[in-house]
Structure formats: C-alpha cells, structure tokens
Image (cartoon, rainbow, N blue to C red):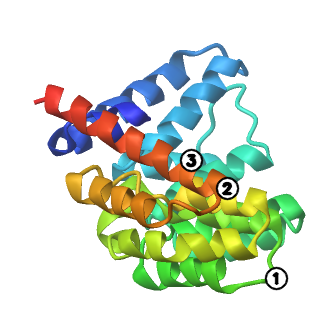
Amino acid sequence: CALPISYGNPIRRPHDCAQLAEAFRQAAHNADPGSEHQLAFIRGLAAYAMEATDLQWLADLLTGDATLEGLVIDADLRWTLIARLTMTAFWDESRIEAEQARDNTAFGAKWAAFCRAALPNAAAKAAAWELLTGSDDIANSIFQHTAMGFRQAEQLALIADYVPRFFIDLPQIWAKHEFYMARDFSLHTFPALFIEEATVEMATNFLESHEGGHVAMLRFVREGRANLIRAMKARQADL
C-alpha cells in the first residue's frame, strides 16, 4: 500500500486506489474458492475500497447478503472489514459496539480500539490521542491498536494538528512507558503520511534538540525522517 499512499503522486491517489480496489475485487472473484489468494485479494480490497459499491459488497459479505464461494469470514477478517467500513464512515460507531458485544474477547477489544481510533471525526482522534498520551493504565494491546488506528491516509485533514504534537509528546511517552508501548507510539503515530519538507524539518529539529534522549526514540525518528525523504524523492519522480 506504500505505492499510491506514500510514493505515488497524491493528485492521482484516488484514481490509483480505485483501480487497485477494482483489481482486487475482480481477482477475488476469479481466485480458487477458499484459497489463500482469494483471502489475500479480499484483504487487498478492504485496504483500498472507497467507492460505495465496493463498501456495500464488503458490508453484504459480513451480513450474509452476499457470498463468495469458499470464503471463510473468521474473526480476523470480520474486524478487517468492519475497520474499513467504519473508517470510511460507511458504517457508524454503533457497528463497532455491536461487533465487540458479539466478540467479547481480548481480540475483539483490541480491534474495537483500532476501529474507534480510525473513525473519521475529530472527536475520535482527540479521544485516541488522549488515551495514548494521557492514560497510565492501559493494556499493551489496546495501546498498540489505538495507535495503529489513529493514522489513516484518507484522514489527513483530521490529524494535521497532531503532527507537531507528536514531537512534543514523544519524550514523555518514552519516559513513562515501557519499550514496546513507546515503540508502538513512535511507529504508528509518527507523521509518516505528511510527506513534505515541513515534517522533515520538524523531525530534524527534534533530533537536534534531543541529542541526549533515549537511543531507541531517536532511532525511530531518524528512520521516520529517512522514510519521508525517500517518499518525497519518489513523488518527485512520479509527475
């Protein structure tokens, strides 16, 4: 998914993603029933679906109003599809609550946290950020999936204000959380989708002003900055 989102020309992103979704849907229909290829193509569609017809088909697969021969919709695939439907606002938050009640397990709880953080509204983003930066009593899996859900390519306007906040809040995350939680925050909320010189400059300023900071924290920022620079060069070539 790095091709149209990070490395491709952002002007063409909607067209590129629509083409990918169409290709994945067609491939899923043509794949051997019950095969790993069929499952992979459905997951590909769930990663890129934006058109109402594709989203409705995914919803119908969940409700049983549509079927695909051989496709087994287990808990993992159910949550993958629900995540796409809720992050695109095709379904609302009530569907997350209903699915969590249906899947009352640790697995269901972490994916419900992902879906809530991925909801396309400012209140959901604020609640997710507060959970990540303001809570001292949170399970690792809930923290990880909240961080994973926060940053979505279709929601840049909603999370733009969190770009500088990432660099402000990052040191306290490393100060108060153990490595794995701090790592998840660093990886999943780094402003990797804001591929522009201003983000690179913020990362550079952070590194220069925190030279004596946590070694791993600085490494994650350096790697994030390097990825931004690489994506900027790729976009310049994709004119």
Q: How crowded is the residue under tag 3: few (<14 C-alpha within 10 Å), some, or many (20+)?
A: few
Q: Residue at x 71, y 18 (%)?
A: 35
How far separated are the C-alphas under marks 3 and 1?
26 Å
Residue 3 in the image, given as x and y percentages of width and height? 35, 31
Asked if residue 123 lies left or right of residue 81, the reply is: left
Q: From the image, tell me which residue sits under label 1.
A: 137
Kind of residue at badge 2: Arg
C-beta proximity under 8 Å, tags 3 and 1 = no
Residue projecting furthest to the left:
239
Q: Along the line of sight, which residue is nearer the eye, 115 or 70?
A: 115
Mark 2: secondary structure: helix
Q: Earlier in the sequence, mark 3 or mark 2?
A: 2
In the rendered image, which quarter is residue 54 located in? top left
Kind of residue at badge 3: Arg
Q: Residue at x 61, y 64 (%)?
A: 147
Instruction: Tell me the number on the disc at residue 219.
Output: 3
Q: Earlier in the sequence, mark 3 or mark 1?
A: 1
Residue projecting furthest to the front:
212
Instruction: Tell me the number on the disc at residue 183.
Output: 2
Mark 1: secondary structure: loop
Q: Residue at x 40, y 39 (%)?
A: 227
Q: Earlier in the sequence, mark 2 or mark 1?
A: 1
